[in-house]
Amino acid sequence: MIGLPDFPWDRLTPYKELALQHPGGIVDLSVGTPVDPVPDVVRRALADASDSPGYPLTYGSERLRAAAAGWLRRRHGVVVDAAAVLPLIGSKEFVAWLPTLLGVGPGERVIFPELAYPTYDVGARLAGAEPYATDGLVALGPERVPLVWVNSPSNPTGRVLPAEHLRKVVSWAREHGAVVASDECYIELGWEEEPISILHPDVCGGSHEGLLAVHSLSKRSNLAGYRAGFVTGDPALVKRLLEVRKHAGMMVPAPVQAAMAAALDDDAHAAEQRTRYAARRAALRPALEAAGWRIEHSAAGLYLWASDGTGCWDQVRTLAEKGILVAPGEFYGTAGGGHVRIALTASDERIGAAVLRLQ
């Protein structure tokens, strides 16, 4: 296993302490953790399923798999067989362990975006493979490339990859025998552009061969505390993943599976949550721009990718002095050294406080 990096968030501690000194309290916009209530429909489903003394199925219940397939068809124009849906203990564990589950190892590369969620890099290292960050389709050297990650909408930048770009990635991967795993956790949060799934026929030509799409209910349904996600795509790949996960005991608790099914069947609460985030975005973005920050990309997702032209840590300090904590761009790759990531996942009151402090 290639050595793991230090956990990046530990480096933010002194700036958090600085922000906490503000007389109005901290406005924590660093980690994208939901703060709004879990929807009632989900909580009822969880409670109704709480008498679950037996082991849950790694494969998930038929109800959950049907709900996931129905949501993809209804909301995203993607048709999958419910048999090709596999529940996850949150999407992060899957990102971290997918290279290992697929048997990727030493002498092989895992490709992911130049600016990216750090766990793609960690997953490669856990498998003993070489993490390789690039936004281009690289010419193969001596290393094999069995796995390519794409992330649209992007964390941290909010960039949306158009269908044409995704088609090129799929074509390249199929020519080189690579699996494409698409992290689509923010797909329902398009603001200025509409995200598209890698499993959409406009991207993949109707064939899911060699493709996996990863989804999370953390952002859509405020279920970060439930650890609720799923993967779907190529039935052969899903079957292969299921066999390994069964041996490893990677089971989503049965009450959580029931809650997930209820959440995926209900679009009303997701629309309400989207409206909340839209309002927070509409308040925070112009306040940052008026204070001297330039917002780049940020066409979708739960973050504003911002720069005032100085280094990312200087920006973190400037905002911490106002009691606002944000994430330095270099957490997501060296290319982020001049930017900060600012989350929309704070209460209306805290977003309002940040707006006042930026004036």
Image (cartoon, helix red, strand yellow):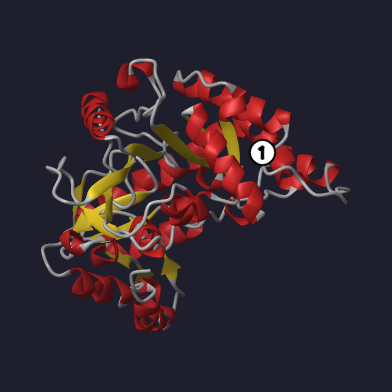
Whether residue 89 can be seen here: yes
Viewer-proximal residue among 160 and 311: 160
Left-right relation of 141 to 175: left
Counting from the top left corner in percent of width and height, residue 26 is at: 44, 73
Q: Quadrant of the C terminus?
A: bottom left
Residue 87: quadrant of the picture: top right
Q: Quadrant of the N terminus?
A: bottom left
Viewer-proximal residue among 127 and 27: 127
Q: What residue type is disc 1 on?
A: Tyr
Q: Quickly name the residue at label 1.
A: 59
Residue visible at 40% across and 25% down in the picture: 209
Counting from the top left corner in percent of width and height, residue 221 is at: 58, 42
Residue 306: quadrant of the picture: bottom left
Secondary element type, mark 1:
loop
Residue 19: quadrant of the picture: bottom left
Relative to 4, say whether 63 is above or below.
Answer: above
Counting from the top left corner in percent of width and height, residue 145 is at: 26, 46
Counting from the top left corner in percent of width and height, residue 36 is at: 58, 51
Viewer-proximal residue among 107 and 110: 107
Left-right relation of 323 to 273: left
